[in-house]
Amino acid sequence: MEIISYVQDNSRKNKMRLPVLRGREKRESVSLTYPVYVPEFRSFSAKKVKKSISLRNILKGLGYGLTQIHVFVTSNIKIIALILFLAAAFISLSTFVFRVKTFSLNHTGPLEFEKGESLDIANLNKLMASFALEGSKEYDETGNLLNMSGLAAESFSEPVSYQTYKVRSGDTISGIAIKFGLRNISTLISVNDIGNVRQLAAGQKLKIPSVDGIIYTVKSGDSLKGIASKYGIKFDDLLDVNELSNEILKAGQQLFIPGVGLDAGTLRNAMGELFTMPISAKFRWSSPYGYRADPFTGVKTFHTGTDMACPTGTPILAAMSGRVMKVGSMHRIYGNYVIIDHGNGYQTLYAHMSKTLVAKGQWVSQGTRIGLVGSTGYSTGPHLHFTVYKNGKLIDPMTILKK
């Protein structure tokens, strides 16, 4: 039994010396003769007896292992508890130190402008004011040009005619409309299918209609009377301007609707006054435009933009096409920032970047990556601070953002 136990409890091969009886010899005593066996020792290799794999043996082994673990834990419970406590304390302390270090790198406590930084803010405000290319607006929110009230009423009894104009350097959409006696900038935008007037370039050719109006694409089920009623125009004017001899319409056919303009939303979009979100990834609105409690001091201050909280490294996109006017860094205020001039009096500021991806003077299209989200400057965590200026003055970004 001892031999069997020895073999079973050892996984490696073991050599043992065991006696082997080779023969016997006779020995005599006084009263009798008896055989005596002479042993001879030989070496044998013993191997562990293999157990067959079965669910029972597996569960048996698992139970044995769990029992051993339970015995170990119960007998060393105090030491294990101490080790776990020390490990948790170490992790907590390391996390605290990391956060303090990160905070010290990105924040400066209550904001107190130094002389040089105050000058930076003043220069930034002057820079924004100098970007305002159009000091006065020449049209109202519906696209009607101002100071055009003295013109005679338009007549829509004649077919609309067109001429071609080649855009020159320095031209504006309102200036071209005035040049040809039109009253609403919607006319040129609709007739030429201009998605964004900021993309007009010298050398581009425009169709100039003889009267104001917009282009309408006929849909299935439309009728001339229904279209005239929808836009509030005379049925006869619609027939005359388009030289229609009957009321038959085909889906996809284009009609000129005289004397009307684009709706306010479409016009604002075409004029580049609706900007796309500078963050296309998932984010959280963390602070709105306007007065709020300062995140460090608790004092109520005016927040010049809107904040979008998201992970560090999230791409920041140009909200509208334009030219990069400044790429800079204000350690105690905006951190790494980019300013883009979009024309028509609009500028945008993108602050607290971990990295800028554009250079001064570079032209960027809407949606171009201009930087990465970070927490540089006066910041409580990774986010984008987005500011919009109109003619050098701050406006609420939510009024121009197209969601």
Image (spheres, grey):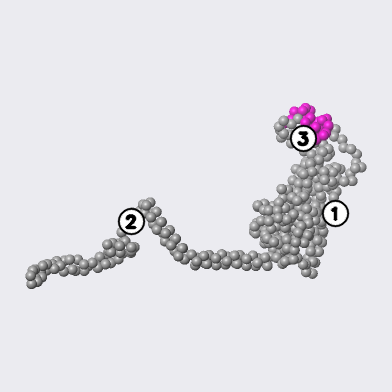
Of badges 1 and 3, the one in the foreground is 1
Q: Amino acid at mark 3?
A: Leu
* Quadrant location of the N terminus in the rendered image: bottom left
* Cβ–Cβ under 8 Å for marks 2 and 1: no
Q: Secondary structure at mark 1?
A: loop
Q: Which mark is residue 135?
A: 1
Q: Is residue 31 left or right of residue 374?
A: left
**Furthest-right residue in view?**
150
**Furthest-front residue in view?**
31
Q: Secondary structure at mark 3?
A: strand
Q: Which residue is more in the foreground, 336 or 360?
A: 336
Residue 382 seen from this side: yes
Q: Secondary structure at mark 2?
A: loop
Identify the residue at horizontal 30%, vertical 66% (top origin). Answer: 14
Task: Give the residue at mark 2.
Answer: 51
Q: Residues within 10 Å of mark 1 (few under 14, many from 20)?
A: few
Q: Is residue 268 above or below residue 32?
A: above
x, y (%) of residue 248?
A: 75, 28
Q: Earlier in the sequence, mark 1 or mark 3?
A: 1
Identify the residue at horizontal 69%, vertical 65% (top origin). Answer: 106
x, y (%) of residue 104?
A: 68, 67
The number of numbered discs placed on residues in the rendered structure image is 3
Q: Which residue is more in the foreground, 380 or 37?
A: 37
x, y (%) of residue 210?
A: 83, 39
Q: Which residues are magenta?
A: 224-250
Q: Earlier in the sequence, mark 2 or mark 1?
A: 2
Q: Amino acid at mark 2?
A: Lys
Q: Is residue 287 above or below residue 213?
A: below
